[in-house]
Image: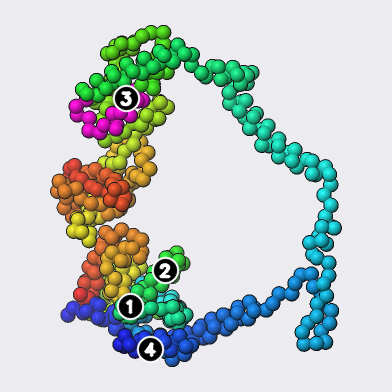
């Protein structure tokens, strides 16, 4: 979507025309959802935050002033909303949604026994600890730097890099580079 | 065959994109409805409290002025006279008498305030002696300070000198004249070079007066593993350290640095003079540097082995 088309969508939203938001939704759901999922790391919560993101975008359209790339702007809002959600719900977030989907997390001892070649990425990620998976998701899906992850999770940067390296080592053993 | 983690992970999430438009639309509608209700509520004019609706036959409501609410309330309330007297009396007692009682207890029971003031004030003779002693002591301590060539921090030495003076001032015999360089009861007033600097530790004047040797320390020695070496944005080397055992038993009173415990892990800058390798265990000095936003710095004293 070009900057002009996006500005047009925002103007339509200002006139209480939801079609402006629908166009943005159709174009950017595939861009915004992985960013939020990468940080929230749980399907239901990621959906809730994504929904809140578009509702917020609709309500803030009136006061919105676009200066830089709208794509970066949207990513920043999504990322901040997801980080806020994680901070507010850091204690109540469920272990993970992999269990809900019926895939049991594989313990570290069982990694070697797993049939490496047939493992899907979801199954491979399920072998990681929740903390490791969060760092990997933030890095890969949300394109965050280690420094940004460290600030978002409020843990030292060394811990972030340590967890990422440990996760990558495990995933490498499962055939993922 | 190696698989591309980043590509496959993104694809897996994209294949599972939810359809949220219905929910979003509903949430926006609900929000707009709420806003509308709030606006309508704000537009409704409030009926004045002292008006009563008397007729509803016409389009506009007709109100009749009744007695003001404040007056009605005034009639109902009648405060007894004893309450009016007792409340201010209790307040006066609390404000004036209770603090006076505490003050009396503080200066000593059985002594009048005048006596206490007399005791506290020095006589003119004693004051003069004090002044001469003060001058002599300062000169003496200044001379002694000159001898402490290796003292790194002047402020520390001055604090020490001041505390020394205060301490001696409490025990001095005021009838005696002091001369430059004289010793009191055979003990030198001057600090020794070793006392002036205590390996980076500071004894403050107030603490010395209280006879408490509380040491402020901004470092700690420990056995620690270096798990990972990274660089910060400025290219400075950072070590991710895990503490196994804390050595020494210093009393730590520094505001920001509370020391470490076994099992703690943290990021620390590596002392440029120190040779530290990833994956090894060291005896280290961990120092606290509030000037670089609460960061720590580690310096290896001895290599102990490799990480388990």
Q: Is residue A136 visible?
A: no
Mark on residue A8?
4
Residue that badge 2 annotates: A84
| Residue drawn at x 34%, y 44% as measured from the top left | B257
Residue that badge 3 annotates: B161
Residue A31 on image: x %, y %:
33, 82
Q: Nearer the viewer, residue B204 or A130?
A: B204
Q: SS for tag 4?
A: helix
Q: SS for tag 3?
A: helix
Q: SS for tag 1?
A: loop
Q: SS for tag 2?
A: helix
Q: Most prominent secondary structure in the magenta stretch?
A: helix
| Residue drawn at x 36%, y 9% as measured from the top left | B177
Residue that badge 1 annotates: A67
Query: In the displayed structure, would residue B82 be above or below residue B196?
Result: below
How far apart marks 4 and 3 lie (CA) works out to: 76 Å
- What chain does badge 4 belong to? A
How far apart marks 1 and 3 lie (CA) works out to: 63 Å
Q: Which residues are magenta?
A: B148-164
Q: Earlier in the sequence, mark 4 or mark 2?
A: 4
Q: Is residue A108 magenta?
A: no
Q: In the image, B115: left or right of A60?
A: right
Q: Are marks 4 and 3 on the same chain?
A: no
């Amino acid at each position: 979507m070009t900057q002009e088309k996006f500005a047009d969508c925002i103007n339509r939203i200002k006139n209480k025309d939801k079609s402006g938001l629908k166009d943005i939704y159709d174009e950017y759901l595939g861009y915004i959802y992985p960013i939020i999922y990468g940080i929230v790391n749980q399907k239901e919560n990621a959906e809730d935050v994504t929904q809140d993101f578009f509702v917020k975008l609709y309500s803030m359209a009136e006061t919105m002033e676009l200066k830089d790339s709208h794509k970066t702007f949207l990513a920043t809002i999504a990322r901040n909303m997801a980080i806020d959600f994680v901070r507010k719900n850091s204690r109540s977030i469920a272990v993970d949604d992999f269990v809900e989907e019926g895939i049991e997390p594989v313990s570290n001892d069982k990694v070697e026994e797993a049939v490496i070649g047939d493992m899907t990425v979801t199954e491979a990620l399920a072998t990681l600890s929740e903390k490791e998976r969060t760092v990997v998701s933030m890095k890969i899906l949300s394109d965050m730097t280690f420094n940004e992850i460290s600030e978002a999770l409020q843990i030292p940067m060394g811990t972030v890099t340590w967890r990422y390296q440990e996760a990558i080592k495990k995933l490498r053993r499962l055939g993922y580079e | 065959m190696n698989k591309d983690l980043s590509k496959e992970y993104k694809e897996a999430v994209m294949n599972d994109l939810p359809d949220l438009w219905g929910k979003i639309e509903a949430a926006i509608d609900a929000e707009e409805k709420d806003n509308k209700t709030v606006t309508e509520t704000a537009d409704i004019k409030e009926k004045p409290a002292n008006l009563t609706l008397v007729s509803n036959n016409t389009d506009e409501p007709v109100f009749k002025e009744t007695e003001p609410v404040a007056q009605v309330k005034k009639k109902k309330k009648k405060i007894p006279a004893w309450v009016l007297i007792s409340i201010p009396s209790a307040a006066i007692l609390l404000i004036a008498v209770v603090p006076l009682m505490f003050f009396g207890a503080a200066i000593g029971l059985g002594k009048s305030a005048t006596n206490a003031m007399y005791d506290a004030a020095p006589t003119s003779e004693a004051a003069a002696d004090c002044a001469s002693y003060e001058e002599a002591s300062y000169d003496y301590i200044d001379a002694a300070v000159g001898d402490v060539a290796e003292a790194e921090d002047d402020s520390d030495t001055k604090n020490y000198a001041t505390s020394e003076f205060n301490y001696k001032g409490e025990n001095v015999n005021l009838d005696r004249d002091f001369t430059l360089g004289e010793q009191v009861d055979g003990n030198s007033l001057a600090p020794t070079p070793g006392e002036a600097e205590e390996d980076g530790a500071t004894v403050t004047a107030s603490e010395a007066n209280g006879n408490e040797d509380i040491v402020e320390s901004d470092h700690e020695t420990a056995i620690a593993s270096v798990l990972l070496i990274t660089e910060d944005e400025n290219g400075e080397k950072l070590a991710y350290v895990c503490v196994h055992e804390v050595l020494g038993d210093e009393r730590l009173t520094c505001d920001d640095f509370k020391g470490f415990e076994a099992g703690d892990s943290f990021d620390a800058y590596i002392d440029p003079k120190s040779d530290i390798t990833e994956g090894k265990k060291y005896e280290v000095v961990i120092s606290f540097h509030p000037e670089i936003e609460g960061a720590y710095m580690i310096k290896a004293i001895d290599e102990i082995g490799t990480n388990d």
